[in-house]
Image: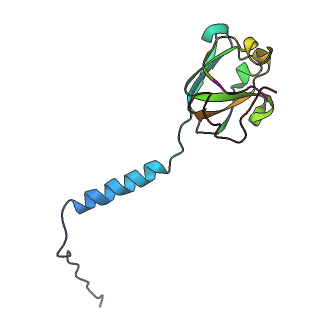
Amino acid sequence: MIPTIKLQRPQSYHPHSRMKFISIAFALSATALPALAATVKYCNGLSLAGTCFTSSPANGACVNVDLSVNDQTHSAEIDGGNCVFWANANCNGDHTDQLDGTINDFNTICGGGWQQRISSFKCCSGGAASTWCAGNKPTCT
């Protein structure tokens, strides 16, 4: 014979208590998501022309540019944050300083030549004057 267990609602049960639990659980799960640093549009043409790609990385996450524009990224638009661009994949090697806003020609950045060097980037929330979220504050190398 299988024993039967009778469940009863506690005296203090309120129909909205389940909703409170769900709201609290949702709020906790939302805070666990990584914050997005910026939305970056990068293009192989000057002034955001040509083939373009858009990425919204998490704060401090490295993004390798699409292979079709590797070492051919001529311009970018950074919305809602600031980014550093690297000469090698996986955010290694020489890099720019913190940039924000629109870069119409990477040849004007850090002494020039960056339109033929960009392979990856990393972004942080806030403007270029903000504290860098991923280590020491970068300068052009």
What range of the chain is rendered magenta?
Answer: 95-99
Does 65 sit above or below residue 7?
above
Q: Residue at x 50, y 47 (%)?
A: 33
Q: Is residue 107 left or right of residue 33?
A: right
Between 138 and 61, the residue placed more toward the observer is 138
Q: Quadrant of the C terminus?
A: top right
Q: Quadrant of the N terminus?
A: bottom left
Residue 98 lies within the magenta run: yes
Would you say residue 87 is visible in this rendering? yes
Does 66 sit above or below residue 9?
above
Find residue 43 and report its image quarter: top right
Between 132 and 47, the residue placed more toward the observer is 132
Majority secondary structure in the magenta region: loop
Residue with the most extreme front position? 129
Q: Residue at x 63, y 33 (%)?
A: 123
Q: What x and y, as percent, mark residue 27? A: 39, 51
Does 127 sit above or below residue 9?
above
Report the colour scheme. Answer: rainbow
Does 79 sit above or below residue 48?
below
Q: Residue at x 20, y 76 (%)?
A: 10
Between 86 and 126, the residue placed more toward the observer is 126
Q: What x and y, as percent, mark residue 38? A: 56, 30
